[in-house]
Image (cartoon, rainbow, N blue to C red):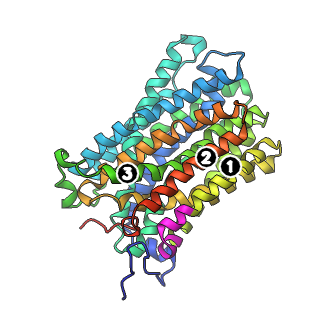
Amino acid sequence: MTQPSTQEECTPSHVHPIGHVATIRLRTVAAATIGNIVEWYDFALYTAATPLVFQRLFFARHDDGLLAQIEPMLVFGAGFLVRPAGGILFGLLGDRLGHARALRYTLTIIGIATAAIGMLPGQATIGVLAPLLLLVLRLAQGFAAGGEWAGAVLLLGADSPAARHRGIAFALTQSGVAAGMVLGGASLWAARQLPEAAFLSWGWRIPFLAALPFLLLGLWLRATPQRDTPIVRSARPHAALQGMGLPLLTGTMLRLAENGSIYMMLVFGMAYGHMHHVPDRWMLLAGTLGMVADGLAMPAFGWLAEHLGARTIYALGAAGMALFCGPFLALVASGSQGGVILAFIVGMGLCHAPMIAVEPALLSALFPPAHRYLGVAVAHEAGALLAGGISPVVATLLVHSRWGNGAVCGYMAALAGLSLLALLARPARRLAFPQPQE
């Protein structure tokens, strides 16, 4: 077979995408994808509960609408501050001792922290300790999430035997993320069907406590021996970050459009709908359906990336998100249930999905195999800190400024522009599907 002119221009396969998936080892798919479902179920609960529960129960009420909204957003964003530290620790651990072992630790920490949130008394009971303890548990969640994503995508991506298969393999891990977020959002939406007094008293706690059986399921899956190659085990921390400055900068910039957009929609979008008196049930349903569209579209865009190139697919998603920001806000503010749902389905299924589907491949290609876990984890979490963690806060401040929605859309366009610049700054051969570790 004639080799492609660049690594990115992967040879099209005559095999149907389902045939691609069949070539990936089932055990690794279960450990990476289902483990990701468990992790991001937990994380999605906190995301959805920030404007719907924590703002009401864990923070002092203010007459100023901006101040009442910004406090829980800041605690939400605080979890991103420790994600790079988690990426460094678990990246070093995964490169030296194996990806599966590091992933068991991340799963345990985030699962226990999530269940503990479900048992926290509110501010009316323990006063200022309520937001402080919430902050501590949020930091624990963020620290663990810092090492989860990179290990899961590399565990699955390394088991895909040929370059033309890895678009599907990497995208599958992101479908696991979407599925977890769907379950998290759906569980909180189901609890929200209770009368408001019951929901705020005990109903919202049930989805958080449900993390415990999910934790046991994830640990059982990840106890199965996984493929950890000798080159992974040979990594040494003293040389890990040498010569990685430019790849880390590129990877961080690549993350900005994808991560900033998803949290702008899921966190700020919820608060924005609340500002316009959109019922909470509608917003939770729209967010859940958006994640369904996101997860279903990811493998399709992974398959397209095998034919069109990962850079092309990511660029289309980033440009689409910048252009759709204005319509997204207008649809949410329309007061129409159909409009709100359409905003999330289009924004997440057609704009976010192309970016997240190919992002694992783009980041993995930047780093050598011996330090790939560390490099991918640090770039991924640095981007999350600079975009995902602060985008809801920035968007909330901007929408209350004199420029309103236009300023929010300008901010999203700037994030997209930086990611597109990172795509152009690196040669195509360095932003392709990486070779599996041998």
Instruction: Choose the circle earlier in sequence order: 1 or 2.
Output: 1
Looking at the rendering, the stretch of residues picked out in magenta corresponds to 304-315
- Identify the amino acid type marked 1: Cys
Inter-mark Cα distance, 1 to 2:
7 Å
Q: Which mark is residue 150?
A: 3
Query: Is 307 within the magenta?
Result: yes
In the image, 127: left or right of 4? right
Where 427 falls versus 391 (above or below)?
below
The residue pinned by badge 2 equals: 412
Say if the magenta span includes residue 413. no
Q: Residue at (63%, 24%) from the top-left corner?
A: 55
For the point 39% across and 81% down, which residue is it? 4
Q: In which quarter of the image is the C terminus?
A: bottom left
Which numbered disc flags the more N-terminal residue, 1 or 3? 3
* Residue 58 seen anywhere in this rendered image of the structure: yes
The quarter holding residue 147 reads: top left
Residue wearing tag 1: 325
Q: Do the residues labelled 1 and 2 touch (CB within 8 Å)?
A: yes
- Residue 247: x and y, percent? 34, 54
Q: Nearer the viewer, mark 1 or mark 3?
A: 1
How far apart marks 1 and 3 lie (CA) works out to: 28 Å
SS class of the residue under badge 1? helix
- Of the residues shown, which amino acid type is indicated by label 2? Met
Q: Which element type, helix, strand or loop, lies under badge 3?
A: helix
Instruction: Looking at the picture, tell me which residue is in the foreground, 49 or 83.
Output: 83
Q: Mark 3 or 2 closer to N-term?
A: 3
- Say above or below: 35 vs 156: above
